[in-house]
């Protein structure tokens, strides 16, 4: 960046900050900002906006997009099987208002982007492309990562992104956290499965095997 | 006007215990519950919460029905302690079922603080046995040298220590500290028509009924045909006639504009320590202008929570926590320490890292990749939470009154004032030393401890209608019978004289069984 351009940006930012701080002391300004703040809060309470849409079964194409999304998000640490993710999506669409519509909107959005760029569906794209599309439509909440700038972005552009991240991407990660992630770090089973009353008292099997392998490499017992 | 022999306000573990025992003997009982039905066994709820990560709003009461105001030191969401559904808060609890120790019943005589209970451990011991039998408690005293005396063994064998507990137990033993198994209302083997625990976990909501839920005995009470359950109704006041006897109660369906009256020979208030006091305050009339049972001003007073001070310890080794859905190891070594009296007693427990499930708790984290998730889960495996579950002392800075805020019917909500007193600060200092001792003995490489006001109530609330022999300083007698209204009884944690440091549920159920026996032997049989 050229020095002149840099100084222009710096000067503008400083002016805006000072003017903003002075304006914030004025009641009229706070009054004007209040509706925007309220709108931001309403976006944050996004579950409300899911309420009225009907529940129902997912089409095969929507489900395929959701599973392709899961596969892309978990590509670095792939789960052994996907049936609990499929069950999760189906249950949400069939039982909780708003999910079916959100899933369909999401599938339509990512498919549209995929077709524009490569003329094939989102699910047919490779993992790298799918990840790029997901980063565009459902980035990790800008709101939490970027502070006030993120809030500003959320108000202007982000309602859909927020819904997609919170109710699709983040929920996939949450489900992963309490299922496959546990297996990947050495657990034998996850909560929700009948785990019996013996294993919890011992070192998990995988960890036990690894420990034995290490001992044998080191020449121990 | 509907009528029954006994009307019970609240369908929690205390109300259902009494309803079950009375209906089994043929008495007709109506139970009034403010919240909705909560199907049993809680299979559907388990699937929703654990498999689909969904908290069903149908079981969350609206804020114009479930609310309270708060002043003083308490910094957490007290209103969140209460689960207002059929079965109450024990539909989702850890199931820990401990006995108070004999000295807990006479702290004034032995240590100079609080008041003595109007009954001794010996009086309650047979009822502890009955309560353990009723709930199906798994446990043993063989590894716990600090357990109080008992006349019968636990009905079921204990849940053994978990892998991480064993690591701690060995390290602690070398420093003279005993970590032992924990009695809990969870079936380690088949028990009657309840199946053995298969460790589905997390146990806050049990899909099979292995962890006790009050709905189990309510279901059996309803099967007798003698029990009628009213759901989604708010009891607005107890009615007392000119002769000074309770004649019944006034309630209102939550979605209706008309209140209704129900007459009963016996009225039992078994809401919780806060709502029971509120109902007595709401029931004030010409003859009882300061609330029912409040002639000497003790209704709402002597409130205590447990003070749960949290610490977090971090270890180099991998602990693999949360592989058992409940809790296993605890330490009861400091329930009656030599310095008791200068401060209160303390129980040491290892709750889930973040209740109810460490791996769900990160809901607020904004993960960008699955590797972020793995890093989070790996880190959790090196952490050990610890809670110093501590006795609180009563005092004028802790009480329940009526709030300025009102519910949908126009009745004031409860207002809770709760501040720590000097005794509590001394207990905090004692707990802090114990925490440091634990961290050092277990070789934690990092530790974090809470400030005094950072305590959790642990959803344990006691007092507000305390029992005693003298009407001048208590509200009810040791059976829960109100001193000045003989057919109005209060049951539950609200009648506790002191908090002790152990989880209150088993004591609440033991007292409830004793109350039911008393009712059948001394009141109802004589009326018939």
Image: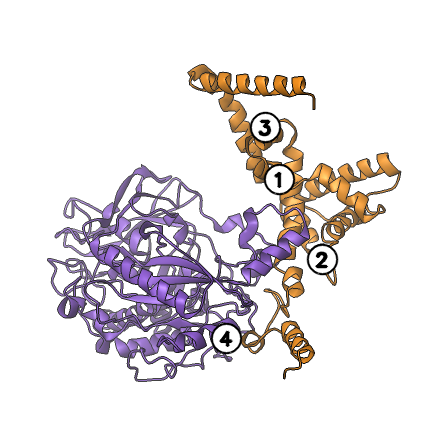
**Element marked by disc 3:** helix
Location of mark 3 (residue): A152
Q: Which residue is mark 4?
A: B194
Residue B14 makes an appearance in the image: no
Between disc 3 and disc 4, the foreground one is 3
Q: Which residue is mark 2?
A: A77
Is mark 3 in CB contact (under 8 Å) with mark 4?
A: no
Mark 4 residue element: loop
| Nearer the observer, B511 or A202 | A202
- Give the image quarter of residue A199: bottom right
Q: Position of residue B150 (x, y in %)?
A: 30, 82
Give the crowd class for mark 4: few <14, some 14-19, many >=20 residues within 10 Å.
some
Chain letter of mark 4 equals B
Specify the colour of chain A: orange
- Which hue is chain B drawn in? purple
Relative to residue B389, is residue A120 depicted above or below? above
Q: Position of residue A164 (x, y in %)?
A: 67, 40
User: Can you identify the residue that label 1 sits on?
Assistant: A141
Q: Which of pointers 3 and 1 lies earlier in the amino acid sequence?
A: 1
| Residue B376 showing in the rendered view | yes
Q: Which is closer to the viewer, label 4 or label 1?
A: 1
What distance separates the C-alpha of mark 3 from that of mark 4? 55 Å
The x, y position of residue B193, in whole percent, is: 50, 77
Residue furthest right as drawn = A119
Q: Are marks 3 and 1 on the same chain?
A: yes
> Do discs 4 and 1 belong to a common subunit?
no
In the rendered image, the quadrant that contains the C terminus of chain B is bottom left
- Observer-nearest residue: B120 or B235? B120
């Amino acid at each position: 960046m050229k020095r002149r351009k840099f100084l222009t940006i710096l000067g503008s930012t400083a002016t805006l900050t000072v003017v903003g701080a002075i304006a914030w002391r004025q009641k009229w300004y706070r009054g004007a900002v209040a509706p925007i703040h309220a709108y931001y809060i309403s976006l944050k309470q996004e579950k409300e906006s899911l309420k009225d849409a009907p529940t129902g079964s997912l089409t095969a194409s929507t489900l395929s997009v959701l599973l392709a999304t899961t596969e892309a998000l978990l590509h670095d640490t792939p789960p052994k099987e996907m049936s609990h993710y499929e069950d999760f999506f189906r249950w949400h669409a069939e039982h909780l208002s708003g999910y079916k519509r959100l899933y369909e909107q999401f599938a339509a959005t990512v498919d549209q982007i995929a077709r524009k760029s490569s003329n094939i569906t989102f699910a047919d794209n490779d993992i790298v492309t799918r990840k790029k599309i997901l980063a565009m439509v459902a980035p990790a909440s800008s709101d939490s990562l970027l502070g006030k700038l993120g809030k500003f972005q959320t108000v202007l552009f982000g309602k859909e992104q927020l819904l997609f991240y919170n109710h699709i991407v983040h929920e996939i990660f949450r489900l992963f956290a309490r299922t496959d992630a546990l297996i990947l770090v050495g657990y034998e089973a996850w909560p929700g499965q009948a785990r019996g009353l013996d294993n919890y008292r011992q070192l998990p099997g995988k960890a036990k095997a690894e420990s034995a392998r290490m001992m044998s490499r080191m020449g121990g017992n | 006007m509907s009528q029954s022999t006994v009307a019970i306000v609240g369908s929690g573990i205390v109300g259902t215990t009494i309803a079950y025992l009375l209906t089994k003997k043929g008495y007709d009982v109506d139970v009034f519950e403010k919240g909705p039905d909560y199907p049993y066994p809680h299979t559907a709820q388990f699937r929703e919460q654990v498999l689909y990560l969904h908290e069903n709003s149908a079981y969350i009461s609206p804020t114009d029905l479930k609310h309270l105001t708060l002043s003083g030191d308490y910094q957490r969401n007290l209103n969140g302690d209460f689960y207002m559904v059929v079965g109450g808060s024990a539909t989702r609890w850890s199931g820990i079922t401990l006995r108070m120790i004999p000295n807990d019943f006479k702290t004034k005589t032995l240590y100079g603080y609080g008041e003595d209970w109007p009954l001794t451990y010996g009086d309650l011991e047979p009822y502890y046995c009955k309560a353990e039998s009723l709930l199906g408690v798994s446990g043993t005293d063989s590894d716990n040298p600090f357990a109080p005396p008992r006349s019968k063994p636990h009905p079921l064998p204990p849940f053994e220590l978990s892998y991480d507990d064993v690591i701690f137990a060995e390290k602690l033993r070398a420093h003279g500290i005993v970590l032992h198994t924990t009695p809990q209302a969870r079936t380690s083997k088949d028990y009657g028509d309840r199946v053995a625990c298969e460790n589905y976990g997390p146990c806050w909501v049990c899909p099979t009924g292995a962890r006790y839920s009050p709905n189990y005995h309510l279901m059996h009470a309803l099967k007798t045909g003698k029990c009628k359950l009213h759901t989604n109704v708010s009891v607005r006041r107890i009615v007392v006639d000119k002769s000074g006897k309770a004649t019944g109660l006034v309630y209102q369906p939550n979605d209706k504009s008309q209140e209704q009256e129900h007459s009963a020979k016996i009225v039992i208030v078994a809401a919780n320590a806060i709502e029971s006091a509120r109902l007595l305050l709401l029931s004030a009339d010409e003859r009882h202008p300061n609330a029912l049972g409040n002639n000497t001003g003790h209704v709402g007073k002597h409130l205590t929570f447990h003070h749960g001070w949290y610490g977090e310890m971090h270890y180099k080794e991998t602990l693999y926590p949360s592989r058992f859905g409940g809790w296993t190891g605890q330490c009861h070594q400091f329930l009656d320490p030599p310095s008791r009296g200068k401060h209160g007693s303390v129980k040491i427990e290892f709750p889930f890292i973040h209740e109810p499930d460490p791996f769900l708790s990160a809901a607020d984290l904004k993960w960008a990749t699955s590797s972020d998730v793995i890093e989070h889960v790996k880190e959790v495996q090196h952490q050990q939470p610890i809670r110093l579950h501590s006795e609180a002392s009563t005092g004028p800075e802790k009480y329940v009154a009526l709030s300025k805020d009102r519910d949908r019917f126009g009745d004031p909500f409860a207002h809770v004032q709760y501040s720590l007193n000097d005794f509590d600060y001394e207990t905090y200092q004692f707990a802090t030393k114990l925490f440091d001792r634990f961290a050092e003995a277990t070789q934690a490489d990092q530790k974090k401890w809470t400030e005094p006001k950072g305590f959790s109530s642990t959803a344990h609330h006691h007092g507000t209608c305390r029992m005693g022999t003298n009407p001048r300083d208590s509200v009810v007698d040791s059976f829960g019978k109100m001193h000045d209204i003989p057919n109005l009884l209060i049951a539950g944690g609200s009648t506790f004289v002191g908090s002790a440091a152990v989880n209150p549920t088993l004591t609440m159920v033991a007292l409830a069984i004793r109350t039911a026996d008393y009712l059948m032997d001394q009141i109802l049989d004589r009326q018939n």
